[in-house]
Image: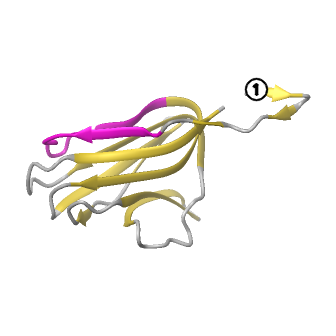
Amino acid sequence: MPRAFGQRLPPVFQLPALLNQPAPVQNTWYTILNTTPNCLIWEVDVRIDTTGETLEWRITIDGVVSTAIGNACLANTDYWGVPVLYNVGLYTEISAVSTWRSDRAFIVEGRSIKIEVRKTTAAGAGNLRGAVAYSRY
């Protein structure tokens, strides 16, 4: 990581990684953020254009995979991909953006991070969207 006078420099904010997948196929993982070295994840948002679809997201940090529990989602509603740290380790879930999680991790940092999303139902052919706000060292 870059250093100035022996100090660690702050990460450089990147343009958000975006996904807009028309007619997503059930149980197919779509990459929002491809494997990216030395980064911090600030936020993950997912949405689907069809009501009743169940979305799941997964994050791979330094080779460790964590998959969220799927939630039935409303059309055109933003949902957070929420990394939550419990005493058993990293756990992920999908929560409505309007739902505040006091146990939500503020950032996730890793030497290698990949973020994907999928729908596990076939309620319709609405677009699947995702965004990741992140920084890199």
Q: Relative to residue 74, is residue 114 depicted above or below?
A: above
Q: Relative to residue 49, is residue 74 depicted above or below?
A: below
| Residue 65 appears in the figure | no
Q: Which residue is mark 1?
A: 2
Identity, as a three-letter code, of the amino acid under mark 1: Pro
Q: Which residues are magenta?
A: 16-35
Q: Position of residue 59 (x, y in %)?
A: 43, 44
Q: What residue is at 44 percent from the left and 51 percent from the top?
A: 44
Q: Position of residue 108 (x, y in %)?
A: 58, 48
Can you name the residue that lies furthest to the right here? 5
Picture quarter containing residue 50? bottom left
Q: Position of residue 45 (x, y in %)?
A: 39, 53
Asked if the stretch drawn in magenta spans residue 121, the answer is no
Q: Quadrant of the N terminus?
A: top right
Q: What residue is at 14 percent from the left and 50 percent from the top?
A: 126
In this view, the residue in front, 52 or 69, is 52
Q: Relative to residue 34, is residue 85 depicted above or below?
A: below
| Residue 117 appears in the figure | yes
